[in-house]
């Protein structure tokens, strides 16, 4: 009968030392920079199609396309952050006026029908003279 032997597992990695409060936080991503043939850093700028301003490439995010390609966003970060927010109304403190006035209901009591019609008196109706 054969027994399966598990190889010895490596010891768990030691936790990172706590950071001193005076030290800056380490960068999470590598700084992206473009260099020309001479080794000088080149600043690439794009025009935002929403605000029509020329901004550095760092102000634009990346977009993953359906075919797997990764391209730059066409709008800058400031335009994209304000795109989904609702515009504040003019009168913040005042209550919003209703678009339709509320219908006014009036209760009217119906008079009981009279059985005998009374002749109109001369006092009530002026005499018509011709």
Image (cartoon, helix red, strand yellow):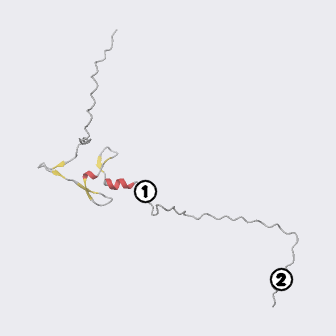
Q: Earlier in the sequence, mark 2 or mark 1?
A: 1
Q: Quadrant of residue 128?
A: bottom right
Identify whether 63 is placed above or below 79: above
Closer to the camera in the image, 30 or 95: 95
x, y percent for residue 56: 24, 54
Label 2 neighbourhood size at 10 Å, few (<14), some (14-19), many (20+)? few
**Which SS class for mark 2?**
loop
Identify whether 127 is placed above or below 24: below
> Looking at the image, which residue is at 87% across and 69% down?
115
**Which SS class for mark 1?**
loop
Q: What is the C-alpha distance between the residues marked 2 and 1?
A: 70 Å
Please identify, in this view, whether the residue under mark 2 or under mark 1 is nearer the observer. Answer: 2
x, y percent for residue 11: 27, 23
> Looking at the image, which residue is at 48% across and 61% down?
93
Closer to the camera in the image, 105 or 15: 15
In which quadrant is the N terminus drawn? top left
- The answer to whether 18 appears left or right of 41 in the picture is right
Q: Which residue is mark 1?
A: 86
In which quadrant is the C terminus drawn? bottom right
Q: Quadrant of residue 24?
A: top left
x, y percent for residue 9: 29, 21
Label 1 neighbourhood size at 10 Å, few (<14), some (14-19), many (20+)? few
x, y percent for residue 27: 25, 42
- The answer to whether 81 appears left or right of 10 in the picture is right
Q: Which residue is mark 2?
A: 123
Q: How many marks?
A: 2
């Amino acid at each position: 009968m054969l027994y399966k032997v598990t190889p010895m597992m490596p010891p768990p990695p030691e936790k990172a030392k706590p950071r001193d409060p005076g030290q800056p936080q380490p960068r999470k991503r590598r700084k992206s920079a473009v260099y020309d043939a001479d080794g000088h850093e080149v600043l690439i700028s794009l025009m935002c199609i929403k605000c029509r301003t020329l901004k550095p490439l760092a102000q634009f995010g990346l977009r993953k396309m359906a075919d797997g390609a990764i391209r730059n966003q066409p709008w800058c970060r400031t335009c994209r952050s304000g795109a989904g927010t609702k515009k504040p109304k003019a009168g913040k403190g005042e209550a919003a006026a209703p678009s339709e006035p509320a219908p006014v209901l009036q209760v009217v009591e119906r008079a009981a029908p009279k059985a005998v019609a009374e002749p109109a008196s001369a006092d009530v109706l002026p005499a018509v003279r011709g």
